[in-house]
Amino acid sequence: MDGAFAAGLLVSIITIAIQALGTVVVIKMVRIAAQHLSGRRKIETLVVVMAASGTLLTVFHLVEVMVWAQLYALTGATEPDNIYYFAFVNFTTLGYGDLIPARPWRILGPMTAANGMLLFGWSTAVLFSVLSRAIAQLHIK
């Protein structure tokens, strides 16, 4: 169990670093967009900025799920053809329960779910911040 906990903690740190990078990319993209998009088309600009932000954050979440899936593959926690499915089900806290990891690695499921909740919450905060700033910059009422 200690090895599983350490592995889960390491992957959590890696995915948090990926999320931090994603946050920086989204913030830079929003700043560039704010400088180059026309203020005359406020609603269209807002839609583009929010769609781009949400898409980028989703891509980073997909990478984070892939990192968890690689841990499942390395440890043999689940069958090789189920690693991505298992990672997604846990990361999104969906928890179907149709797959159960090998006994020594069972702690990885809840660790993946806790990490996913944290990172989805972080993305929600980033999206809310982007929306708030875009509305303020575009003077949308």
Image: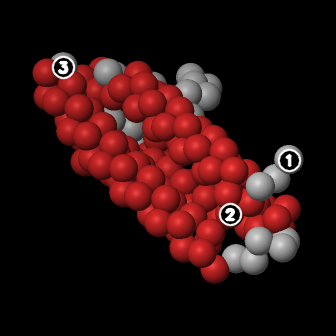
List the residue tagged with mark 2.
49
Kindly state the secondary structure of the residue where label 2 is placed.
helix
| Up/down of 47 relative to 114, above or below | below
The label number, if any, that marks residue 141 in the structure image: 1
Kindly state the secondary structure of the residue where label 1 is placed.
loop
Is 53 left or right of 18, judged from the image as shown? right
Kindly state the secondary structure of the residue where label 3 is placed.
loop
State the image quarter where residue 22 is shown: bottom left
Q: From the top left corner, tell me how far across and down residue 3 is, in percent.
A: 14, 28
- Asked if the residues shown at circle 3 and circle 1 are in contact, with their CB atoms under 8 angstroms apart, the answer is no
| Up/down of 11 relative to 54, above or below | above
**Disc nearer the start of the sequence (3/2):** 3
Is 27 left or right of 21, judged from the image as shown? right
The label number, if any, that marks residue 1 in the structure image: 3
Quadrant into which the N terminus falls: top left
User: Which residue lies at the image location 39% right of the left edge and 38% below the top edge?
Assistant: 78
Front residue of 69/37: it is 37
Q: Amino acid at mark 2?
A: Val
Alpha carbon of mark 3 to alpha carbon of mark 2: how far?
A: 44 Å
Q: Amino acid at mark 3?
A: Met
- Residue 133 visible in the current orientation: yes
Q: From the top left corner, tell me how far across and down residue 59 is, in percent.
A: 53, 59
| Up/down of 36 relative to 4, above or below | below
User: Which residue lies at the image location 57% right of the left edge and 64% below the top edge?
Assistant: 30
Front residue of 140/125: it is 140
State the image quarter where residue 71 is shown: top left
